[in-house]
Image (tube, rainbow, N blue to C red):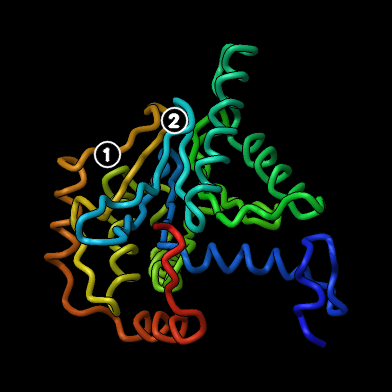
Amino acid sequence: MFKGQYDNDVTIWSPEGKLHQLKYAMEAVNQGSVVLGVRSKTHAVLCGLQRSPGDLASHQKKVFKVGDNMGIAISGLTADGRKLCKFMRGECSWYKYAYGTNHPAQRMAVEIADKQQTQTQIAWGRPFGVGLLTIAADATGPHLFHNCPSGNYYEYYATAIGSRSQGARTFLERKFDTQAFPDASPEELIKWAVQALKETVRTKDIKLNVENVAIAIVGVDQLFKNLSETEVEPYVLAVEAEDTGGDEEIAGDQIAEEKEGGDMDVDA
């Protein structure tokens, strides 16, 4: 059967039980530039690759502050990401005004999941074509959540989304197998995040620098902070200096992923 008969409206189900417009939204996330997150017992870190649409253009912002204890990184349609970011900032401000404390991390993840899921069941809208990685620290410790366009959300110790993100996930899985994440220091988390980001650009021969790498951190005793270029530079230089050509298995994962989807710049 032709899928064109079933993708005119997000509320029309195909005979296979699929919502085609939702699949298109999730593909927009897969084609966006990569973002990743890692967390330990005390801190959580976001890292993203900021692409530029041209030599004369600035790099697209990927990491946003939401509240004093919370921030997000986006992959997919940047306009949709800014809209959800504005909603989250409003919720954080209202919660702090009403209760005098920072917004709980899981409650925010559920609110965003509900908002995204609503867009899959109304005929006068479309799904948000953006994936969110949210880091936050509250009374229960640091958290890392992934919200996808379908309305599903998951909590991770480490994950990555976006174009060629499989290389980063493979690297982070290997680090996780060493039981290193729970007791890692903030500096170690940031270094691993940049190393994982490096794995996603090996096959593209992209050099990481302070302009195309965005890093943010939050902790149980530290407010959310976007690192400045001066603070990012030592980690980027250290990872580039250690780079000796990459791991063949990770590169193979990246090449296989490229063959499946390509790299449409939906962030720019």
* x then y, percent, for residue 3: 76, 80
Q: Which residue shows up at 68% across the image and 55% down it?
A: 127
Q: Nearer the viewer, residue 57 or 70?
A: 57
Q: Is residue 178 visible?
A: no
Q: Which residue shows up at 43% across the image and 59% down it?
A: 179
Q: Nearer the viewer, residue 173 or 149?
A: 149
Q: Which residue shows up at 28% across the image and 66% down it?
A: 198
Q: Is residue 19 visible?
A: yes
Q: Is residue 73 left or right of residue 104?
A: left
Q: Nearer the viewer, residue 3 or 189?
A: 3
Note whether 63 is above or below 7 in the view shown.
above
- Label 1: which secondary element: loop
* x then y, percent, for residue 73: 45, 48
Q: Quadrant of the N terminus?
A: bottom right
Q: Residue furthest right?
A: 15
Mark 2 or mark 1, earlier in chain: 2
Q: Which residue is mark 2?
A: 220
Local crowd size for mark 2, using a 10 Å CA cut-off: few (<14), some (14–19), many (≥20): some
Local crowd size for mark 1, using a 10 Å CA cut-off: few (<14), some (14–19), many (≥20): few
Q: Nearer the viewer, mark 2 or mark 1?
A: 1
Q: Which residue is mark 1?
A: 227
Quarter of the figure with residue 196: bottom left
In the image, which disc is placed on residue 140?
A: none
Q: Is residue 141 left or right of residue 239?
A: right
Give how far apart the Cα atoms at labels 2 and 1 are: 17 Å
Quarter of the figure with residue 197: bottom left
- Label 2: which secondary element: loop
* x then y, percent, for residue 175: 39, 64
Instruction: Name the residue type under label 1.
Output: Leu
Instruction: Name the residue type under label 2.
Output: Val
